[in-house]
Image: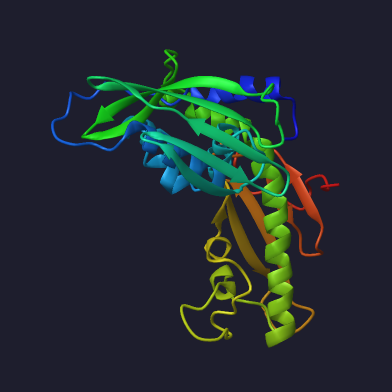
């Protein structure tokens, strides 16, 4: 863990408290899963940064809001859930009836989360848990909390931290804005990756690709001129981490070394997924400026 336990816990508490519901579901009849096991699944999904699995343990209203925020914001949320900065490998151990030990191991640290027996109250349940670093043998840094859960359509869903309820949908725009800097850095990295793929394609086939789609992975079989396998499918489709990417051949020719091209990255949703527009000119110079969501130009300042 790369920041102090107190700072991490404050961030964890704030973010985890955003797991809310619009309305409590009515009591369900018949057997339902153990709320402690649902919390275990949430911790394991958060450890591995599996956003789709994590969304399954949210209420319908919060799951919809969670799906709308950018991938970077979703990842940040899951990082704080287990108090680790990077994805890890989760392991689960059944300690006794309705209680579990979840271990999240990454190259930097190991988090241990002990999930206790739930206290059900009709349609609600409260699940205690402790979290600490595995290297903390004295337990002095252990943090104690309680998760509120609600039954929705017969399944337990995460609801609150203790009795503190907030509304995740009202925070989704704010969360995305907090990730703008991360998205903008990723846009520069992705533009460079596209440029490298274009140049690799040029060297391999002695011409520029007609579109970014040509650089994507083949559906099956070996790479070929129509599907060169030089970019991820996501980047080849021109959209990743809150930015839309454009590729334009400059001039009439696409053949040989003299042929030139321009690349651009613009926010998918200006002011929410990004503010800066990035432009790689035909000479390979990276530039950026705030164009209110429009495409940048070769007159923009250079990116240092």
* Horizontal arrangement in the rendering, residue 242 relative to residue 24 (left or right): right
Q: Position of residue 163 (x, y in %)?
A: 42, 13
Residue 291 shows in the view: no
Residue farthest along the front direction in this orientation: 96
Looking at the image, which residue is at 86% across and 47% down?
Answer: 304
Q: Position of residue 229 (x, y in %)?
A: 59, 76
Looking at the image, which residue is at 76% across and 59% down?
Answer: 281
Figure label count: 0
* Residue 116, above or below 273: above
Residue 128 shows in the view: yes
Q: Position of residue 268 (x, y in %)?
A: 54, 45
* Horizontal arrangement in the rendering, residue 257 relative to residue 50 (left or right): right
Q: How is the image coloured?
A: rainbow
Q: Nearer the viewer, residue 89 or 274?
A: 89
Q: Nearer the viewer, residue 204 or 21?
A: 21
* Residue 206, above or below 134: below
Residue farthest along the right direction in this orientation: 304
* Horizontal arrangement in the rendering, residue 13 relative to residue 278 (left or right): left
Q: Position of residue 101 (x, y in %)?
A: 50, 38
Looking at the image, which residue is at 78% across and 46% down?
Answer: 300
* Horizontal arrangement in the rendering, residue 202 relative to residue 246 (left or right): right
Q: Nearer the viewer, residue 158 or 202?
A: 158
Q: Nearer the viewer, residue 53 or 173?
A: 53
Residue farthest along the top direction in this orientation: 163
Quadrant position of the N terminus in the picture: top right
């Amino acid at each position: 863990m790369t920041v102090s336990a107190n700072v991490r816990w404050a961030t964890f508490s704030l973010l985890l408290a955003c797991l809310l519901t619009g309305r409590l579901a009515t009591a369900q009849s018949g057997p339902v899963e153990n709320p402690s096991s649902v919390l275990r699944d949430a911790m394991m999904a958060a450890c591995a940064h599996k956003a789709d699995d994590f969304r399954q343990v949210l209420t319908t209203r919060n799951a919809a809001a969670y799906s709308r925020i950018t991938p970077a914001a979703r990842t940040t949320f899951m990082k704080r859930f287990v108090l680790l900065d990077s994805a890890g490998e989760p392991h689960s151990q059944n300690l006794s009836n309705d209680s579990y030990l979840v271990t999240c191991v990454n190259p930097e640290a190991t988090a241990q989360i002990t999930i206790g027996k739930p206290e059900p109250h009709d349609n609600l349940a409260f699940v205690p848990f402790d979290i600490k670093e595995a290297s903390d043998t004295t337990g002095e840094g252990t943090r104690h909390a309680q998760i509120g859960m609600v039954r929705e359509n017969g399944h337990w869903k995460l609801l609150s931290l203790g009795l503190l309820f907030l509304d995740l949908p009202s925070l989704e725009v704010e969360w995305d804005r907090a990730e703008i800097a991360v998205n903008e850095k990723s846009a520069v990295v992705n533009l460079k990756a596209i440029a490298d793929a274009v140049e690799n394609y040029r060297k391999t086939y002695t011409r520029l690709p007609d579109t970014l789609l040509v650089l994507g992975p083949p559906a099956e079989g070996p790479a070929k001129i129509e599907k060169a396998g030089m970019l991820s499918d996501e980047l080849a489709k021109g959209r990743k981490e809150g930015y839309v990417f454009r590729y334009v051949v400059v001039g009439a020719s696409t053949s040989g070394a003299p042929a030139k091209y321009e690349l651009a990255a613009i926010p998918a949703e200006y002011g929410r997924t990004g503010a800066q527009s990035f432009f790689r000119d035909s000479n390979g110079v990276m530039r950026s400026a705030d164009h209110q969501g429009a495409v940048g130009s070769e007159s923009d300042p250079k990116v240092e």
